[in-house]
Image: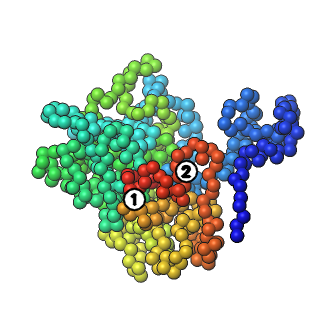
Amino acid sequence: MASLARHVDTDELIKTLHDHPTHKAGHHNHNALSHTPYSSRYAAGLELSKFRIPQDGAPADVVHQLLKDELDLDGRPSLNLASFVGTYMEKEAEQLMVENLSKNMSDADEYPAMMDMHARCISIIANLWGAQKGEKAIGSATTGSSEAIHLGGLAMKRRWQEQRKAAGKDTSRPNIVMGANAQVALEKFARYFEVEARILPVSKKSSYRLDPELVKENIDENTIGIFVILGSTYTGHYEPVEEISNILDKYEEKSGVSIPIHVDAASGGFVAPFTHAKAGFKWNFELPRVKSINTSGHKFGLVYAGVGWIIWRDESYLPKHLIFELHYLGGTEESYTLNFSRPGAQIVAQYYNLIHLGFSGFRSIMENMLANARLLSRALEHTGWYECVSDIHRKKGDRKFVKGNTPYEESDSSSDYNAGLPVVAFTLSKDFKKDFPHVKQVAVSNLLRAKQYIIPNYPLPPDEEKTEILRVVVRETLSMDMIDRLVTDICNVTETLMQSNVSDLSAYQPNTPSIEKLHSSQGLQKKDQHKAKRPMSKGVHRSVC
């Protein structure tokens, strides 16, 4: 029988039991000689202040070392296989970023060379996305895809309002259509800018992405646009932009209502243009109905966090009254952003990547990532313990997992496989669950975390949330050697769980959150998800990205 236990306040415990006489006396010798950070009074005599600014500062070397020590408790970025955000740049790119850290994108007149690089990036990306002759593409860097999505959505809303007003029609009930697999930024746009979000359920039949048949049933004259995702954060699937475009063409022929598409290519915008597989269909400005596209430079654009891009196919699709003319620090600039001050170093780094790698360099990196993702997928399914929900390792057109099928591996070109992001989404196989019903999939994630891998376990979107997946984003740093090691560690962890009983498995639980986390975040741990104010069934699930 377990004994009763009281909660321990660790802060109070440390304060009470500390044995340093000067700490209890409340005074310190500020002139004491400190040879290293660990011989200073902060090593054992005095805590660094956590919640109030200290009266007196502390030596730079001490603060640096102690903060570095605390940050060592974070996961290793290169093993954060949950994230799409890049964690590697070449030293030359890093040096350029350091040299330009102090430059502010809002000071356009003061940093003309940086702004020229910004303009070049817009032109290069627009051409990658099929900019059409006779149209004048226009765009901007953003702090990421979330801001870019809001800008694209707002432009669609204002164009819809202008068209409705010109026709003398009501403008009070705008709506926008998206799949339940959408990243939360898309629903944020709808809520923040007062647009009804028509969030359509996804299913296994639709490959857990926006279902074109449901789009037909949920559009009307008040639909400002469709958010179509080129690369779902759940499974890496590309949504069928061309098929949805064709549906909207037929709807316009029938009703006279023209509904635009905004492509959220946060991840796929820097993958599809370079791979042999492309997107498997038309998705960019080659389709007249696609009016704007966004991407994250800090994902597969291979830049550190802090840069996104949005481009409209022609300046006519960006309403003039949304563009601000800024008279600032001696210059005049046009601006359409949600932020003012923002870092300029990432713009320089993006231009560096585009020029340094070129088309062939980007293609090599993207094809390598897809090849390694296919290898990981095949290895997991070969064990018999796992099956993949993602399908980039299957022959083009083959979407389903079939037990016992020989894996397709006759080509090293992505063009012979299903197009998608280098993402491996997998789940315990039906046979494994039958043989080991006591093993919970989250335990795999937790034990891999002990080996420093961060591989999330989370439910699929609403209506499919009973299925949980583990997901690996295969970034450029996850080389074949690392795939080999990862497969070995996943197999070892799985075997450990197979040999464990229910009592053993109860120990494999997530860590208790810090005091700061408890006080600063309204988020919930999985065990408390039933307490959520807005459960998955009420909207877009918070996806890992």
Give the mark, 2 or 1, whose residue is nearer the N terminus. 2
Farthest residue to the top: give it.
330
The crowding category of the residue bearing disc 1, from other C-alpha atoms within 10 Å (few below 14, some 14 to 19, many at least 20), is: many
The one nearer the camera, 416 or 352, is 416
Q: Give residue 322's quadrant in the image.
A: top left
The residue under the point 19% across, 47% down is 220
Q: Give residue 93's quadrant in the image.
A: top right
- The scheme the figure's colours follow is rainbow
The amino acid pointed to by label 2 is Tyr
The one nearer the camera, 413 or 7, is 7
User: Is there any visible trace of residue 157 in the rendered image?
Assistant: yes
The one nearer the camera, 24 or 449, is 24
The residue under the point 19% across, 36% down is 170
Image spot of residue 153 (x, y percent):
32, 41
- Asked if the residues shown at circle 2 and circle 1 are in contact, with their CB atoms under 8 angstroms apart, the answer is no
The residue under the point 25% across, 49% down is 286
The residue under the point 64% across, 62% down is 450
User: Is there any visible trace of residue 163 in the rendered image?
Assistant: no
Mark drawn on residue 497? none
Mark drawn on residue 461? 1
The amino acid pointed to by label 1 is Pro
Image spot of residue 336 (x, y percent):
36, 32
Total marks shown come to 2
The residue wearing badge 2 is: 88
Mark in front: 2 vs 1: 1
* Quarter placement of the N terminus: bottom right
The one nearer the camera, 246 or 177, is 177
Image spot of residue 497 (x, y percent):
59, 73
The crowding category of the residue bearing disc 2, from other C-alpha atoms within 10 Å (few below 14, some 14 to 19, many at least 20), is: some
**Numbered disc 1: secondary structure:** loop
Task: State the separation of the CA atoms marked 2 and 1.
Answer: 30 Å
